[in-house]
Amino acid sequence: MSKKDFQPFQRGLEEKRRSVTEFLETAPESKVEMCCKDAGNVQAHLEVIDDALHKAGDRTLGICQVCREYVEPRWLEMDYTASVCLDHMSETERRSLEAELELSRIVQRALLPQIVPVITGAELAAFSRPAEIVGGDYFDFFQYRDGSQGLVIADIPGHGVSAGMLMGSLQASIRTLAPDKVSPAEILAHINRFYIHNIHFTTFVTVFLASYDPNTRILTFANAGHNPPVIVRRIDPDVVWLKPTAPAIGLTEEYQPRTERVTLARGDMLFMYTDGVTEAVDQEEDQFGPLKLAEILKENSDLHPEQMIQLIRQELETFVGGRPLQDDTTFIALKILD
């Protein structure tokens, strides 16, 4: 490989490092803690990036440890830590890589249409508005292998075409993996493996991924550094926050997401949102914040999801004084009816 061949890898690695470093240096401490869980893992990821940058600089990136030739470029793009040629892999390793490469092709296809599903015994509504023409927020609905309803909301730092493209990739990944996986945590772990060393994935994504079984009313979820969704109970004055159970996607080397479960009851509402809601600011630069959001949800818990969506939109517009929101804004409301 020539020096020119390594330039795309260097640019991607430098952008990835800059994105993570800027987040650590500028984000509020509470947000860093929510997204990272353990800052030591993020530092380990930066060290891996630095090592790859050094190897790209001296053209040793991707050299096979067995034959000392360069590994296949398409594989190196997907995993810049790759160090063994296809010819020197075991049959099991080769099959695994082929599956990853197939997923890589799938996630580049056009996005599937988004449909709000009908859920037995529940009502669902959603709203999303980008700060620019193309946003970095994403939500979707899909089916798991066992027939349970899949729910996902995610946020990538920034907005614009590049953020929108990454969100499209995430959507395709989840829709591809969900029919073959048994839990949200398993899907997140697979996606993190796919993205963590991918040269084209230069930032991180927060994701709340859940499955809801209408027969048992059990919500199973994994939260990858995303703003905690809130459950408003019909018979309990306190709300339940579904806090992160894993770091954000693409942010740490060690990645072991944890699945948690919560049972919903008649009249309960689950409200999912992106940080464009809670980080909206008024004319004094005060944030809308999660506590104000929870207060509005509790005081209006009798509303149906579509009504709650409209109310939150109105409250946000009033809070910012009619000014355009500075960030993408997305929220989803799920209410148990019977």
Image: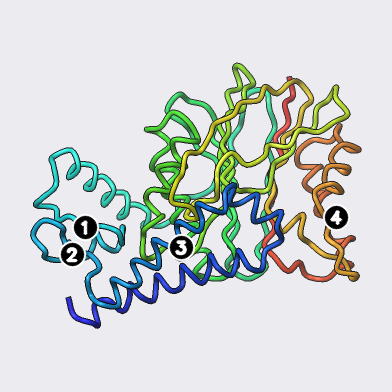
Q: Classify residue 284 as left or right of residue 92.
A: right
Q: Which residue is mark 3?
A: 46
Secondary structure type for disc 4: helix
> In this orientation, which residue lies closer to the viewer: 80 or 298?
80
Q: Which residue is mark 2?
A: 63
Q: Earlier in the sequence, mark 4 or mark 1?
A: 1
Q: CA distance from mark 2 to mark 4?
A: 57 Å
Tag 4 near tag 3, CB within 8 Å: no
Q: CA distance from mark 4 to mark 3?
A: 42 Å
Q: Nearer the viewer, mark 2 or mark 4?
A: 2
Q: Which residue is mark 4?
A: 314
Q: Residues within 10 Å of mark 3 (few under 14, many from 20)?
A: many
Q: Classify residue 42 as left or right of residue 316.
A: left
Amino acid type shown at disc 1: Ser
Q: Which residue is mark 1?
A: 83
Tag 3 near tag 1, CB within 8 Å: no
Above/below status of 208 relative to 54: above
Q: Earlier in the sequence, mark 1 or mark 2?
A: 2
Q: CA distance from mark 1 to mark 2?
A: 6 Å
Q: Earlier in the sequence, mark 2 or mark 4?
A: 2
Above/below status of 242 relative to 316: above
Question: What residue is at 43 percent from the left and 74 percent from the top?
Answer: 14
Amino acid type shown at disc 4: Gln
Q: Classify residue 292 as left or right of residue 115.
A: right
